[in-house]
Image (cartoon, grey):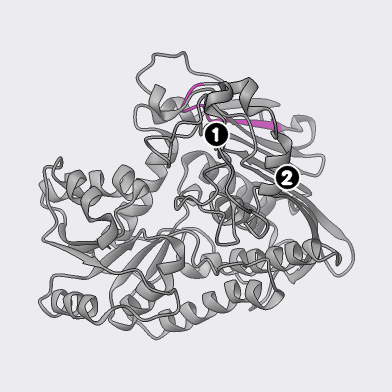
Amino acid sequence: MSRPHAPIRHVALIGLGWHARRVYYPWLEEAALQGRVHLSAAVDLHGNSEAVRSYLAQRRVAPGRLLFTEPARPSAPLPEALLGQLAGLRAAGQLDGVIISTEPRAHQRYVMWALENGVHVLLDKPITAPASAASAAEIAQTLWSDFEDIARALAASPARLVVQAQRRMHAGYRFIQRYLEDFIGEYGVPVSFLDVYHADGMWVMPDEWDREHHPYKHGTGKLLHSGYHFVDLCSWLLESSARVNPAPSELEFQVQTFEPKDFLALLDGRYARLFGPEQVPPPVPSVAHYGEMDLTLMGRVLTREAVQTLVSLQLLQNSFSRRGSPAPASDPYKGAGRVRHERLNLQVGPLLNLQVHSYQAYETRDSRTPLPYGPGHLDHFDVHVFRNADAVGGMPFEKLEFGKAAQPHGHNEQARLALLEAFLDGRPSGSELEDHRRTNLWLSRIYQAIHGQRTGDQATGRMPWSGPTARSTRSP
């Protein structure tokens, strides 16, 4: 449980990309108009200045300072000019919190500055993103060592660090987590099976593999795009079994990946038929060392005596899409045919089965099209509860339509904003940095296993599941 903090009244938004413009800025604007916060500054790269100024010209609230800086190597310190500007805001009492929404390779530089200066942090996932994480075991290990470096800086700082992993604040998943806590606490039976599936249908054209948004060219892919949420979801939900005796002690797993080169081979020669010969996109020269597109993981959580939980994780970007043209998407964040299919299937032995079903058939651009709630709807998110009523009582089946209750804002957007509000209000979030310790150890070990797969070694991984190395705190 995190210690209480005073509300944040002066905040800087670092990074004004597609995600920040869609989620953070509109909310901060409303909060500023209500007098709840002051947007002290917005920070971005000089190369994005035209797009940023154009966006801000349409808003009702402007940041107090608009700061631009130059790109730098991820390991390089922040530029002196920017350091001076941020220090000036801090000294003037105009900066007590930052929202870091830059591209992930820049996260650590901003996080370390903030923690060293006692500035609270809301950080987009992933924590860090070392380039070419699957190219060598030592590079994959830096995902974990970066986390430990940040954790040490946080321990020495009066500030807090909240990770924007919104499924920890999602009404449907919080219901499942609490249900599990109560059920396992009463009957003492751990989770025996967990299957998590996520596909987002982001169709990358052959000439787009060098893109900047959700890139593959830096040697990471789906796992550090939306995949982070689902590795974290597995870790968080399985924490419900931690107090069962015997406690889980170790995870072992295997991984397989589907790479950009595999996707290019899958559709090679088909684009002319799909779009016409005049619209065949020319491929980038090489994608040989690019990041993973899809990943499947099969694992088991062990006690010292037996297998306790079978785990299945399926993360896809090569999946059902609504993109129908090779023309560049006007919104690379929620465009490019991106539709979400999300599923969870969790068993507690013969006693309980919890399921999530969330299936879109439309892009966000179709949000104004009136549709009946159900599979295919933009906000479809249902939880199914099956109980062995003859053994544990209760209703044999219950269906809860969380997506229906979340309209008109959307269930994921509500969860993101709930985390943002908890951060700014100084309230517990359930997504503090330490809550993500095991998640980041697991990510590091997954990339080590991917490296093993690519080099012909065994694509397996092992890690402690409990204890100081992988400890994880409960949500509030």
Which sits in the foreground, 346 or 21?
A: 21
Q: Give me the disc on residue 390.
A: none
Using a 10 Å C-alpha cutoff, classify the residue at mark 2 as few (fewer than 14 neighbours), some (14 to 19) or many (20 or more). Answer: some
Q: Nearer the viewer, mark 2 or mark 1?
A: 2
Q: Under tag 1, what secondary structure?
A: loop
Q: Give me the disc on residue 340.
A: 1
- Number of marks present in the image shown: 2
Q: Residue 1 placed where, x, y %? A: 46, 68
Q: Mark 2 — residue?
A: 262
The amino acid at mark 1 is: Arg
Relative height, residue 217 to residue 199 (above, below): below
- Identify the residue at horizontal 53%, vertical 77% (top origin): 146
- The answer to whether residue 428 of the structure is visible from this angle is yes
Q: Residue 422 placed where, x, y %? A: 33, 56
Instruction: Tell whether 431 sits left or right of 316.
Output: left
Which sits in the foreground, 2 or 123?
A: 123
Which sits in the foreground, 49 or 11?
A: 49
Instruction: Tell whether 67 sits left or right of 181.
Output: left
Hey, which quadrant is residue 327 in on the image? top left
Q: Residue 345 placed where, x, y %? A: 70, 38
- Identify the residue at horizontal 68%, vertical 69% (top origin): 135
- Identify the residue at horizontal 34%, vertical 67% (top origin): 121
Instruction: Tell whether 252 sits left or right of 77.
Output: right
Q: Which residues are magenta?
A: 377-386
